[in-house]
Amino acid sequence: MSKSRLPMYLGLAAAGAGGYYLYRAGGDPKRATRQFEDDASRAGSKIRDESQKALGHGSAEEIGASIDHADERAAKFAKEEADKLNKTRHNVAKDVNAKIDTFDKTVEQKAAEAKSGVSSWFGGKK
């Protein structure tokens, strides 16, 4: 007794849509089919685009541009850091060489003093 009326409503909607497309096509069933397929394709792509935007996904061009921008920033950052590292390395090398030279001079001076002190024990001249 309580049959579902859903199939009847779906059938009426399909018949109405078919009549609409047939009317727009001027009675040509092939042209009506093409128009229906075009509209369905357009609606499907619109739904996909909106769902991707809702999920936070952009178009392929936007994603590609974002990747390119990130790649450029990474390359720039790597170059800047390499330059900083190179400059720091040169400064450290210069400081180390200066310290080594100072140490060398001190050692040579002390060695000369020690040599003169040892020579004086044995009667040598300064």
Image (cartoon, rainbow, N blue to C red):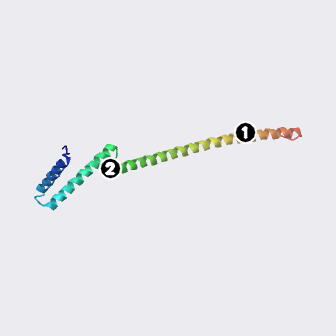
Element class at badge 2:
loop
Q: Earlier in the sequence, mark 1 or mark 2?
A: 2
Numbered label attached to residue 59: 2
Q: Which quarter of the figure has residue 32?
A: bottom left
Vertical arrangement, residue 29 with respect to residue 78, above or below: below
Residue 94: image location, x then y, percent: 61, 43
Tell me: 20 left or right of 80: left
Residue 115: image location, x then y, percent: 82, 41
Residue 69: image location, x then y, percent: 39, 48
Residue 77: image location, x then y, percent: 47, 45
Q: Give 122 or 41, whichever is nearer the viewer.
A: 41
Numbered label attached to residue 25: none
Tell me: 31 left or right of 53: left
Residue type of the residue flagged with mark 2: Ser
Element class at badge 1:
helix
The residue depicted at 23 percent of the width and 50 percent of the height is: 43
Contact? badges 1 and 2 (CB < 8 Å)? no
Q: Give 62 or 54, whichever is nearer the viewer.
A: 54
The residue depicted at 34 percent of the width and 51 percent of the height is: 60
For the N terminus, the quadrant is: top left
For the C terminus, the quadrant is: top right
Q: Nearer the viewer, mark 1 or mark 2?
A: 2
The residue labelled by disc 1 is 106
Q: Give 1 or 54, whichever is nearer the viewer.
A: 1
